[in-house]
Image (cartoon, rainbow, N blue to C red):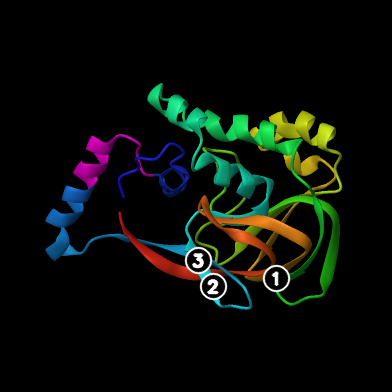
Amino acid sequence: VIASGSGNDFGKGMGIPTDPIVCMRQILKCIRRENHGIPIKKTDLGQVTWENGKKHRIFGISAGVGLDAIVCKKALHSNCKKFLNRIHLGKLTYLFLTVQSLFTMQTTDAAAVFDGKGQQNRKKMIFAAAMNFRAEGGGVPMAPGADAQDGKLSVCMAWGIPKWRTFLCLPLLVTANHLRIRGFEVTNCKEYDLKLKTPMVLHADGEYCGDVTEMHFQCLPKKLHVMW
């Protein structure tokens, strides 16, 4: 892996250096060791399906609906992102677009089922992010305790919080102190289903998937093998 994006959450989660020269040296080192056994790090992946299983997407970092998905969709064509990338501040794009989107988005009521163990209702959901690594959006630690090798997803949800209060909570979110706030929660699970009252934007690793009401998320344990 050579990390070259504006966020690089996958590379950071894997502990891969951001310097491309250092990455190339590591790759060449692995190639030279080919006949002597290359250390392999086996990492989980995630999968989200929607439209009754007709569509699916594999993800390495995260997938989810709501605020973070709206931000990802906007970032794909954002002039702000292009400008900040030029001055090497691309990761600030997500923070800027989060603030912008928070006060214009519509929340919705949701019903979640984790590992098939009963339905949990969430009023006025702002977002639900299925995390494989701890951070997305250029280093925002949505699920500080997430482990990409434990065979589980860490689902971070925010619901029932007034938008103005959510705005005030953003500093706690970016410093991984949001879980002590009522309305933020993280649930670790192998799979979960989410049903929404009204459609929300769905993303997988920042790529727009569609506006959906029902989806299924699951962990795919040890599916990605990385030379180390």
Residue 89 lies, with reference to residue 106, above or below; the image says: above
Query: x, y (%) of residue 112?
Result: 77, 66
Q: Earlier in the sequence, mark 1 or mark 2?
A: 2
Q: Which disc is residue 129 wearing?
A: none
Residues shaded magenta: 16-26
The residue labelled by disc 3 is 57
Question: Seen in the image, is 88 located left or right of residue 145?
Answer: left
Residue 126 lies, with reference to residue 82, above or below; the image says: below
Q: Is residue 23 magenta?
A: yes
Three-letter amino acid code at the position of disc 1: Asp
Question: Seen in the image, is 155 located left or right of residue 135?
Answer: right
Q: Which disc is residue 55 wearing?
A: 2
Query: x, y (%) of residue 181?
Result: 82, 40
Q: Are marks 2 and 3 in contact (CB under 8 Å)?
A: yes
Disc number lying in front (2 or 3): 2
Question: What secondary structure is marked by label 3?
Answer: strand
Give me the C-alpha separation between circle 1 and circle 3.
15 Å
Q: Earlier in the sequence, mark 1 or mark 3?
A: 3
For image coordinates 57% across by 48% down, the residue present is 134
Three-letter amino acid code at the position of disc 2: Lys
Query: x, y (%) of residue 107?
Result: 80, 49
- Residue closer to the observer: 198 or 192: 198
Direction top: furthest residue: 87
Place residue 97 in its image quadrant. Answer: top right
Q: How many marks are shown on the rendered structure?
A: 3
